[in-house]
Amino acid sequence: MKNHFRLAATILLILPLTAFGQSRLRDLSFYSHDVHDTMHVMVLLPSHYDPAHAYPVLFLLHGYGGDQNDWTTKTNLAEYTSHIGLIVVMPEAKNSWYVNSQMDPAEKYEDYIMDELPKFINERFPIDTTREAVAGLSMGGYGALMLGLRYPHKFQFIGDLSGAITTPEIIDSMEDVPGFNLGTQRGIMPSIIKAFGKSNKRFRDDHNVFDLLKRDPAATIPYIFMAAGTQDGYVEFRPADHAFIDSLHAHGDTRYEYHELPGEHDWKFWNEEVRPMLKRMESIMELRNQ
């Protein structure tokens, strides 16, 4: 009898926390004219959400093969953000690489992420458009860094976890890149070709983070947070990170940090590293505690 009582008490303690976490989530969808499809987006609201208050926003991007549910089901994101006033927007973007497809003109994912989606969010939630951030992992890490550099005046903060920043230059040298023939990458290459095309080098340069960095004055570049795992199976990623950090330094940008830690290209690493990324973002964007 005592054991049953203890079990019931435990359940009563756990259920409100679970229900409270779920109550912060909004699972939304709308038809996108930019990609000609119904798109899904998960929104995580602050713990003490007040529709009369304008909140900073983080656009948090998924990786290749992922979707809008990844961050809330595979990390402790709700717990990590429970103490700060922040709206987190997690859009579905399929395997688009967050660009307007060069092989399928009907799929304008960059326009969707940068224009159509923010309008949809701003119509439904009170957003402080002077305090916006973008972050992501793997494909989404590349997407965050690329979009943050293409639209430096929109964002205050960029977060890149295990970012695939060799994209799109990989198209020009894919045979020479160490590790590129990993089995998992054989499946990824068609999506890269679909996104960036085979012949439009100008488009690729316009979405190459190294080229974009050279175009932006150092003073205009958002704060950049990068982290990578030392056991990441994509062996070309960390050398690319090192080269990018060297480029930042040469460019005169001092508002960045790079962390190289034990870990693989997996959710264990991303769950661990999203927390310090959020903590740095909290400081840079001066987020209000709940």
Image: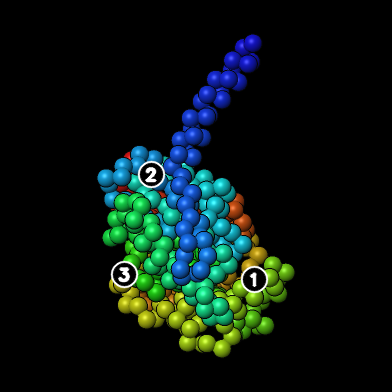
Q: Are marks 2 and 1 in contact (CB under 8 Å)?
A: no
Q: Quadrant of the N terminus?
A: top right
As drawn, the residue found furthest toward the right would be: 183
Residue at image location 39% in from the left, 74% down from the top:
150
Please provide percent x and percent y for residue 233.
Answer: 66, 65
Relative to 284, residue 79 above or below: above
The image quarter in which residue 56 lies: bottom left
Earlier along the polypeptide chain: callout 3 or callout 1? Answer: 3
Q: Is residue 32 or residue 151 the one in the foreground?
A: 32
Give me the disc on residue 46. Answer: 2
The amino acid type of the residue labelled 3 equals His
Q: Which residue is mark 1?
A: 188
Please provide percent x and percent y for residue 177.
Answer: 64, 79
Q: In 3D space, how far apart are the residues under numbered discs 3 and 1 (Cα atoms)? A: 31 Å
Mark 3 Cα within 10 Å, few/some/many (few <14, many 20+)? few
Earlier along the polypeptide chain: callout 2 or callout 1? Answer: 2
Q: Which residue is mark 3?
A: 153
The answer, for residue 25, to whether it is visible in the render is yes
Residue at image location 46% in from the left, 70% down from the top:
34
Earlier along the polypeptide chain: callout 2 or callout 3? Answer: 2
Q: In 3D space, how far apart are the residues under numbered discs 2 and 3 (Cα atoms)? A: 25 Å
